[in-house]
Amino acid sequence: QQYTAAIEAASPSGREQVEAFRIQYLGTKGIVKSLMGSMKDIQPDQRKAAGQALNEFKKLAEAKLESLQDANESAGEDDQKFDLSLPGDFVGVGTRHPLSIVRGRIVSIFKKLGFAIAEGPDIEDDWHNFGAMNLPEDHPARDMQDTFYISQNPSWLLRTHTSSVQARVMESQKPPIRVICPGRVYRNETISARAHCFFHQVEGLYIAENVSFADLKQTLYFFVQEMFGKEVKVRFRPSYFPFTEPSAEMDISCLICEGKGCNVCKHTGWVEILGSGMVHPNVLENFGIDSNKYTGFAFGMGVERITQLKYRVNDLRLYSQNDIRFLQQFTGAV
Ligand code: PHE
């Protein structure tokens, strides 16, 4: 009776414990065998009943062992339960986001030219985003970039360009400086096919002795050819930025309509892809960089626009809607 209760209560799990159970009860030196050995000590008139009881007990032990072994097998411990020839389940692999793909290409092109990557905070103070960039308070050019201010503390804002990162680099490094600053920027604009309240930039900065506008042009020509191919036409237009003088915007021939006329190039055949110029002496002096000794160029481009031209994306909102039909078109692109 004692052993019967013990068997019923036993719950070994795993191959080893089940085997230990077998040895304990049904092994050659196990309990069943030793009880059988003690039959000879039982009074002859009680032997029949004892024999039957022992038989019941043995069956119980065997049944328990069998059920333990079954349970153990279905718990998957036994490899032979698996049919390795069955076809596997499909595990979908995601695609890289087009903006990540293009940012990666831009970065690797400038890396070839020796530019290092710099990053900085999305939430900035007025100085790094505007003041240091030669936009003092009340400068009308601040209106060019509709700014989101942090309501709890309006001296903080969401950076409107990654020039703020360039400011942080100039703050902490001495020339020669050669960095690109990829990152997300924010502007308070109504969301449409052509505008969004956030987008992504890659800005570049090169400061050393004798850096000229010719270096700027050559660098950007190289970038365009690597990015879009040798056939693409390029033009510079004079422009204005408070932090560069002289300033220029760069256009490339429209890759969407190839000159036939479309909404992206507004039927001009040209699309603006970046702003650039020679770093304004005030900006250099703001960081204690001697503007008589050093000169530099800077440029800034929107990743969305480059991606639009590269992949013919006709609506900025597609980038952030997570529509799988859009994203799947970039399968395999790296
Ligand atoms: N910071 C400018 C912008 O966001 C781009 C730019 C960078 C222009 C560097 C000139 C030089 O619009």
Image (tube, rainbow, N blue to C red):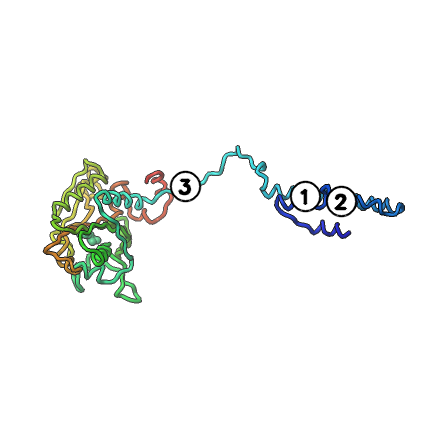
Which SS class for mark 2? Answer: helix
Where is residue 143? Give x, y as percent. Answer: 19, 59
Image-quadrant location for residue 102? top left
Image-quadrant location for residue 236? top left
Q: CA distance from mark 2 to mark 3?
A: 58 Å
The one of 106 and 254 positioned closer to us in this rendering: 106
Which residue in the protein does label 3 denote?
93
Q: CA distance from mark 1 to mark 2?
A: 18 Å
The residue that appears at 16% across and 41% down in the rendered structure is 234
Q: Residues within 10 Å of mark 2 (few under 14, many from 20)?
A: some
Amino acid at the residue labelled 3 = Val
Mark 2 lies within 8 Å of ligand 1 (Cβ measured) = no
Task: Name which of mark 1 and mark 2 comes first in the sequence.
Answer: 2
Q: Quadrant of the C terminus?
A: top left
Where is residue 35? Give x, y as percent. Answer: 78, 46
Amino acid at the residue labelled 2 = Val
Q: Residues within 10 Å of mark 1 (few under 14, many from 20)?
A: few
Which residue in the protein does label 1 denote?
67
Q: Which residue is at the far right?
A: 45
Mark 1 lies within 8 Å of ligand 1 (Cβ measured) = no
Query: Disc number at residue 32?
Result: 2
Tell whether label 2 touches label 1 (CB within 8 Å). Answer: no
Q: Nearer the viewer, mark 1 or mark 3?
A: 1
Q: CA distance from mark 1 to mark 3?
A: 42 Å
Task: Name which of mark 1 and mark 3 comes first in the sequence.
Answer: 1
Tell me if I can see residue 145 in this picture: no
Amino acid at the residue labelled 1 = Ser
* Number of marks: 3
